[in-house]
């Protein structure tokens, strides 16, 4: 029921008792003066004006609002820095994502790789589709359940941002009606005898254009074996209903047993189509294995040596087929030439007092190499500044192009954007996956304060929370899409920042 104004209620007469007649109200002489009970509260209109909208001078009120705003900025919650209180949980701000999906598997997969597909490059349509391979880490009591997973993730729709999405085209009516479909995870599995430490995929075109590209995987296991599988038919079966996979195809095409200890360093050469594989172990030994016609795989009998610690990561040069780099727990990065008869590094640089866990070679500028260390620092290096050393000694006091200590836990993964040499993705043990833009200058006046939040460099674009994240990769064919894996499963997303 609607409320009535107080003045209306005041104008009504009191109820009449039985036998009474209404009496006309007494007329008031307009000439009479009435006392204003509020006349002494304000002395002038100027005084009322100075009091401001809430009874305080404007400058006092504005100063307090500014102080309160600064308090809010200083208390911005940063995953990895701030701790949640009991009963609290984090929820993503969906307005900052174009796409965000999380998927879980029976066992965590702490290493994976994205497989190129035939759906086209520079894709922007939704729903998106991603193909990937991963290796599981089952409990020690259930090690027999470990497997190599071949995956197809489809129905990856974008966030429902309404009709005002700046990326939407005028011809929205022509977009796929299934744009808001639910995500689907399809898998094929190959049994593995042990936990996967690291897995990498390699693809090369077929001799016959009517056949699909051949996709190989190299899986480095906890038991020190390296298994090579051909997963072409498993991938093809996702899009060919009724395909029956021959059980023989689940067997590895090669089992390499040259390592005497487990390792985490694996990489395929991008410049050798038939397949050339690098593997490094905890004993500091590095082997090169080359594929030949007939499906034969031959590892070198003599390893490359020189590190004083375990080989944590390894990468081929993107443009020199005989050059590769390694990262070690001895705090050094070394650059090697496979043609060297001495099997020693051409360049050695001490870059950290802690383990160097991961490295990434820029695909756009081959003189740029990024590294991530156990103390949470990651850096970008210009290889043109590193000098060869004939005696194998490390370069002294190298200076990085850029270095950041935003993360306070170990860096677990790092990767350059596939087409932009200034964008980086970094995963760390503080449960965050961060995106960075190295093109932002340190002296940029507009971004010096980073919205007033302390200890946050202006190059930091985005902080994505992901539980126990271990590895991340950019999708090479869908711009801006990042996929990560950790103890909580897989996450795949695209932010408004990249």
Image (cartoon, helix red, strand yellow):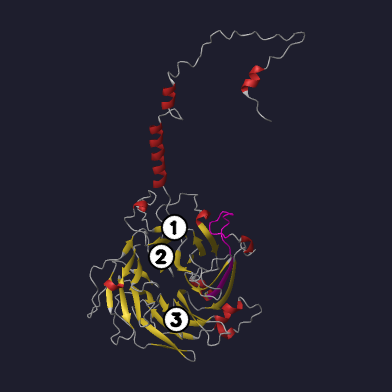
In the image, residue 248 lies at what x, y percent?
Answer: 57, 86
Label 3 residue SS: strand
The residue at the point 53 percent across, 82 percent down is: 213
Say whether marks 1 and 3 touch (CB < 8 Å): no
Earlier residue among tags 1 and 3: 3
Residue marked by disc 2 = 424
The residue at the point 30 percent across, 85 percent down is: 340
Q: Is residue 31 left or right of residue 313?
A: right
Say whether marks 2 and 3 touch (CB < 8 Å): no
The residue at the point 64 percent across, 8 percent down is: 27
User: Is residue 161 covered in magenta?
Assistant: yes
Earlier residue among tags 2 and 1: 2
Label 1 residue SS: strand
Mark 2 and mark 1: Cα distance apart in space: 12 Å
The numbered disc on residue 463 is 1
Residue marked by disc 3 = 226
In this view, 324 is above or below 31: below
User: Is residue 288 covered in magenta?
Assistant: no
Q: Is residue 486 visible?
A: no
In the image, residue 471 lies at what x, y percent?
Answer: 45, 68
Q: Is residue 367 left or right of residue 180?
A: left
Label 2 residue SS: strand
In the image, residue 78 lies at what x, y percent?
Answer: 42, 53
Mark 1 Cα within 10 Å, few/some/many (few <14, many 20+)? some
Query: Would you identify the image quadrant in which residue 339 lies?
Result: bottom left
Mark 2 and mark 3: Cα distance apart in space: 29 Å
Q: Which residues are magenta?
A: 148-169
In the image, residue 118 lies at what x, y percent?
Answer: 55, 76
1 or 3: mark nearer the eye: 1
2 or 1: mark nearer the eye: 2
Earlier residue among tags 2 and 3: 3
């Amino acid at each position: 029921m609607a409320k009535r104004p107080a003045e209306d209620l005041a104008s009504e007469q009191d109820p009449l008792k039985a036998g009474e007649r209404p009496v006309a109200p007494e007329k008031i002489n307009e000439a009479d003066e009435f006392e204003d009970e509020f006349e002494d509260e304000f002395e002038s209109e100027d005084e009322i004006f100075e009091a401001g909208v809430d009874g305080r001078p404007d400058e006092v009120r504005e100063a307090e609002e500014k102080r309160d705003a600064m308090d809010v900025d200083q208390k911005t919650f940063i995953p990895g820095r701030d701790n949640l209180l009991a009963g609290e949980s984090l929820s993503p701000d969906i307005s900052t994502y174009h796409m965000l999906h999380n998927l879980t598997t029976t066992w965590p997969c702490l290493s994976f790789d994205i497989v190129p597909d035939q759906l086209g490059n520079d894709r922007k349509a939704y729903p998106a589709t991603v193909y990937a391979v991963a290796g599981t880490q089952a409990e020690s009591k259930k090690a027999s359940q470990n497997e190599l997973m071949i995956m197809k993730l489809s129905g990856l729709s974008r966030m429902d941002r309404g009709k005002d999405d700046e990326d939407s085209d005028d011809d929205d009516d022509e977009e796929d009606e299934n744009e808001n479909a639910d995500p689907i995870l399809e898998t094929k599995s190959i049994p593995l005898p042990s936990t996967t430490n690291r897995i990498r995929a390699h693809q090369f075109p077929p001799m016959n254009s009517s056949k699909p590209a051949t996709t190989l995987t190299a899986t480095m296991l906890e038991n020190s074996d390296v298994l090579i599988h051909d997963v072409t038919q498993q991938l093809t079966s996702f899009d060919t209903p009724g395909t029956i996979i021959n059980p023989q195809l689940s067997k590895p095409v090669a089992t390499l047993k040259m390592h005497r200890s487990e390792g985490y360093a694996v990489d395929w050469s991008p410049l050798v189509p038939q397949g050339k594989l690098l593997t490094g172990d905890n004993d500091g030994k590095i082997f090169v294995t080359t594929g030949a016609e007939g499906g034969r795989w031959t590892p070198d009998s003599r390893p490359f040596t020189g590190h004083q610690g375990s080989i944590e990561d390894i990468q081929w040069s993107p443009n020199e087929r005989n050059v590769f780099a390694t990262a070690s727990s001895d705090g050094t990065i070394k650059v090697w030439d496979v043609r060297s008869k001495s099997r020693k590094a051409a360049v050695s640089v001490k870059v950290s007092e802690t383990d160097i866990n991961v490295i990434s070679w820029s695909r756009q500028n081959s003189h740029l190499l990024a590294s991530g260390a156990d103390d949470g620092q990651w850096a970008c290096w210009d290889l043109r500044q590193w000098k060869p050393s004939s005696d194998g000694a490390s370069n002294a006091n190298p200076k990085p192009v850029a270095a950041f200590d935003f993360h306070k836990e170990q860096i677990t993964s790092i990767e350059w954007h596939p087409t932009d040499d200034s964008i980086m993705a970094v995963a760390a043990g503080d449960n965050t996956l961060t995106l960075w833009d190295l093109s932002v200058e340190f002296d940029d006046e507009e971004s010096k304060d980073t919205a007033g939040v302390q200890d946050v460099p202006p190059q930091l674009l985005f902080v994505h929370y992901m539980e126990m994240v271990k590895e991340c990769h950019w999708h090479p064919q869908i711009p801006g899409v990042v996929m990560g894996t950790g103890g909580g499963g897989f996450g795949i997303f695209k932010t408004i920042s990249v």
